[in-house]
Amino acid sequence: MTMKLSSCLSDLGITNASPFADCDGIHEEFKVIKKIYTQKILKDHPDKGGDAATFRTTRAAWQVLCDLHESGKVKNDTFTSYLVGFTSATGSDGNDYSEENEVDVSEEEWMDQDLADLYKKYSKNTSVPSYEYYEAAALEEVPGYKVELAKSGRSKCTKCGEKIERDGVRVGSLDKVTGTYGRWHHLDCWRVPTKVQNGLTNLLDEQVSLQDLLMMEEVLLTGVGALDEASKLLFVKHCVDGDHWAGSKKRKRKQIMAGKAVGDDNRSGAEATKSNEVAEGSNKSIIAGSFAVLVPGVDGALADDTLNGKTFVISGTFPEVGGGDADDVGGVANIKAMIESFGGKVISRFSKKTNFLLVGQNAVARKFKDARKRSVEIMNLRRLQDSLLGNISLHELTNFPALTSDMFVGQAYQPAGAPPPPPPKGQEMELLSSASCASPASKSAAVTKVPESKVAKKPRTTDRKEPAVPKVATSVVPGINAAAAAAP
């Protein structure tokens, strides 16, 4: 399969050369492309109700254009080579005699299998950085930071004052007056800016984080793609380590580890403090990994289209799923992936298309109120599990007892576990793991019938001093009980 570069420009909404009419060179053209891209990606962002497929297409097209611009593979050193353009001409009388000039893009356009493969690779990236990340990126005309290997051993680290050894990874910031990068730092001395933090979608997966950082090329960062593999790995490990974050690093890192968008925590100081205190009282008895993530069509799970057209918002964490470190076991990334594998979509904020609020331990109380106000169904992980196993339908969730925020606070949180076994035929059992997910008719804890023979019985008592001994009629057998029978 081959692919034309004009298709990437078209994905951004650029179908002719008119946007580049005032550009003097390819670098100014690229600035125009970036501006158009940032405006479109904000419009296409799923958090604002945009289509996820269109979002991925827009981002993939932009990344291909970035790669070609950086590698210098743009034909004739201008993007207008791939478009229908306008030849500007002003006569001596001052009138504009510009006319449309058809550009032949059918034969000479740079196109081959490599371009198609590149586009396909970027299209597969399903991570969605926060809306706040793209908002910040839209304000940056030129990447604010550059990472590279030190060209010599003469530059000094702005923070520690020590020299940066040759070929060591260093990070510098843009001087907006001169347009050059300076204020170099050792990688270990560089604090990861909030803008970059907001673009990271999964701190537990280094490959995903690398793709996130590569997506920042020519937007917030530059130079990541030019690093060797070992240096890329060092840079990724540094960026995902919360100890190297600038600002409120620990709070933001915990939010991303828990699968929450950074902008999702717009709470008052008192509410945030209360939530942090609650987190301290989390149920420590929960075993990470005790919940098995379901896979479509495996072990009784339904098909991969079960959640088609359904949109979820997630609040809280799922420690029984596992994920994160000793201080922050979120499990949200795995649950998000599970929902998407069944055809559902997960966004960070409520929209008109939101169907469900999935709540976990220490879910934000405000989310419950917002969900009810919007008539969004609230479910816990057990109910989602039962729905994906076909034990209940999504429509039946409205018949279940309402879930309230206090059920998910600290020690009160009841985790979902392994799927309950099916009841034996002819035997009535209640298989509900907690009162929070009981059926409407259930008012007590789970009860299983126990065979009568195994139930310890209390000895009978009587008011008489001696228990009555019943007389039993027996037959007289000579030589055996004849004497006993003759006794008085």
Image (tube, rainbow, N blue to C red):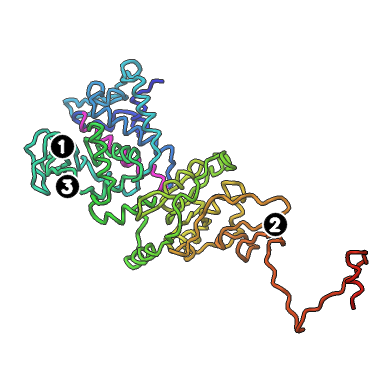
Q: Quadrant of the C terminus?
A: bottom right
Mark 1 or mark 2, earlier in chain:
1
Query: Mark 3 = which residue?
Result: 189
- Asked whether 27 falls inside the magenta stretch, the response is yes
**Residue furthest out toward the top:** 107
Q: In the displayed structure, does residue 443 sit left or right of residue 284?
A: right
- Does 242 appear in magenta? no
Q: Amino acid at mark 3?
A: Cys
Circle nearer the viewer, 1 or 2:
2
**For the residue marked with disc 2, what is the amino acid?**
Glu
**Label 3, label 1: how many angstroms apart (C-alpha)?**
13 Å
Q: Is 464 or 277 nearer to us in this picture? A: 464
Is 103 placed above or below 420 here? above
Q: Can the viewer see residue 264 in this picture?
A: yes
Q: Earlier in the sequence, mark 2 or mark 3?
A: 3
Question: What's the magenta bit mostly, secondary-structure-wise?
Answer: helix
